[in-house]
Amino acid sequence: MKKKKRLKKKQGRGKLVWIIAGLVVLLLGGAFLFCWTARITNITVTGTSRYTEDEIISMIFKEDKDRNPFYAVYQEKFGSHEDIPFIERYEVKVTGLHSAKVIVYEKSLAGCVEYMGSFLYFDREGIVVESSGERDPAVPLITGLTFQNVVMYEPLTVEDQGIFQEIMNLSQLLSGYEMEVSEVNLGTGGRVTLYLDRIRAILGTGEYLAEKVAELHDMLPQLSGRTGTVYLEGFDPDAKNPSYPFVEGEW
């Protein structure tokens, strides 16, 4: 009798173990299925002015698996990022099972030069960080800059490397005033000339450059629709009622 009772107990425990094991398998299978089928459907993008939100999303989330929140977390921590032109780096932050946020850090561009049919974009140190066949209107084209050779991710070889910091300062000034300049010409003796649509602005040397740009910004509404040259090289910071000549006509 005792042997039969022990046998029944063992059989009961065996069944219980199998039931628990089955439940664990079902739970694990359900959890795996849940994790595998979860998809990020709501994505927000911040930090970029060169690309639209849809463009960034299409470049980062190329395949269906990229939208899996668990895969996205793994990819962010251990995987490699996409190489996107003009983008220094980006971060993907999963904020929920169906939502994520992409934070973009754009490359700091001072200007670009045209070289052998391409536009070479450089930073404040003159390092060539991007090469493109397309011209980005948000980055001023620098002309009059003499350089010997071009190597990607190395500085342009010019006589005065300090010129790149000056170009960066000018680019930031123009950006701050939301002035879209098609070309910045660097002439002899450090003379600066800006080209804005149908207006040419001769600023002269870099002295009082910020004040000259501010003065030009204030003059532009009055020059809307006109074609000609503004001469700001004679800028006087102490003038009470400054007036700078504008010569009508093509240059």
Image: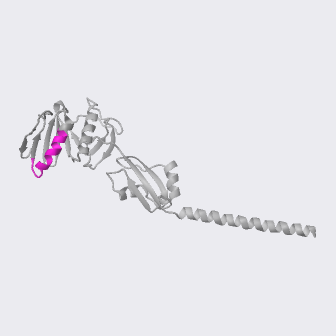
239 is higher (above) or lower (below) than 120: above
In the rendered structure, the answer to whether residue 189 lies left or right of residue 64 reads left
196 is higher (above) or lower (below) than 26: above
Report the residue at 53% width, 57% height from top.
70
In the rendered structure, the answer to whether residue 238 lies left or right of residue 155 reads left
Q: Which residues are magenta?
A: 212-227
Residue that lies at the very extreme toward the left in this rendered image: 248
Q: Is residue 220 magenta?
A: yes
Q: Quadrant of the N terminus?
A: bottom right
Report the residue at 11% width, 49% height from top.
222
In the rendered structure, the answer to whether residue 12 lies left or right of residue 69 reads right
Residue that lies at the very extreme toward the right in this rendered image: 1
Report the residue at 24% width, 41% height from top.
173
Find residue 190 and report its horizontal and vertical position in percent.
19, 32
Front in this rendered view, residue 31 or 216? 216
Kindly indicate the quadrant of the structure image that contains residue 154: top left
Kindly indicate the quadrant of the structure image that contains residue 145: top left
Find residue 235 and report its horizontal and vertical position in percent.
13, 35
Q: Is residue 230 magenta?
A: no
182 is higher (above) or lower (below) than 209: below
Q: Quadrant of the C terminus?
A: top left
In the rendered structure, the answer to whether residue 78 lies left or right of residue 207 reads right
90 is higher (above) or lower (below) than 209: below
